[in-house]
Amino acid sequence: VTPSFTTDGDRKKNFLDIGNCPFSQRLFMILWLKGVIFNVTTVDLKRKPADLQNLAPGTNPPFMTFDGEVKTDVNKIEEFLEEKLLGPQHPESNGEALGNEVFAKFSAFIKNTKKDANQIYEKNLLRALKKLDNYLTSPLPDEINAYSTEEVAVSGRKFLDGDELTLADCNLLPKLHIIKIVAKKYRDFEFPSEMTGIWRYLDNAYARDEFTNTCPADQEIEHAYSDVAKRMK
């Protein structure tokens, strides 16, 4: 699948030029996984075109229309697309649930302005990341069953639910990528090397076009957080 990208002036651009929006990237990844050929049109939210305002008044992208119905809630859009895409087989492989705690701790960490409190916020983030890392390194039930004659101590799967990307990954990966870029830029923080599950997960994601070709450029992410990341005093 090779999605085309257009702006208001119908000027072709690369996906790397899009702004930072994990919700949009989440949907781009789902569509790409489904093999859907799609167009992306960027708009200036401060000067919305008339047709956009008429289509979804008071609503910011992303949204979608189907059979004349406008869907403006990202979760509702995902539910609609999920009917056409295989979701995770294991209920515990919930990308939104796994990512929310990590992203909440990251947000508190990056917004903190007090040097004395930085260590506490960093520890909270590390604790949440460790929980995710433990899940990624723990074998899923079918991995254990596949090797019933021997114990499987560490999972070898590529993604949350197995060796293929699912909706769970479309939820989690954009957030995890943002944390990686922003925390390094504004706090000189990196995922610890001993968190092998997270690093393996990201390495596998970066090898997939569905993820890398929908990621905004690092500079876009850094710019989006330039006012969010607070200077510590």
Image (cartoon, grey):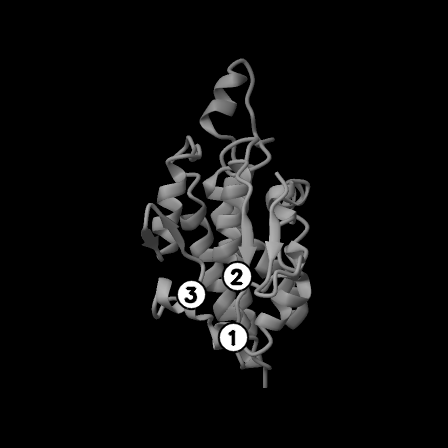
| Three-letter amino acid code at the position of disc 3 | Leu
State the CA–CA distance, disc 2 to disc 3.
Answer: 18 Å
Looking at the rendering, in which quadrant would you find the N terminus?
top right
Residue labelled with disc 3: 52
Residue labelled with disc 1: 111
Residue 104 rendering spot, x and y as whole percentages = 45, 63
Residue 141 rendering spot, x and y as whole percentages = 45, 26
Which one is in front, 134 or 62? 62
* Helix, strand or loop for disc 1: helix
Which one is in front, 203 or 101? 203
* Helix, strand or loop for disc 2: loop
| Three-letter amino acid code at the position of disc 2 | Cys
> Is 142 placed above or below 172 here?
above
Callout 1: few (<14), some (14-19), or many (20+) C-alpha neighbours within 10 Å? some
Q: Which mark is residue 13?
A: none
State the CA–CA distance, disc 3 to disc 1.
Answer: 33 Å
* Helix, strand or loop for disc 3: helix
Which mark is first along the chain, 2 or 1? Answer: 2
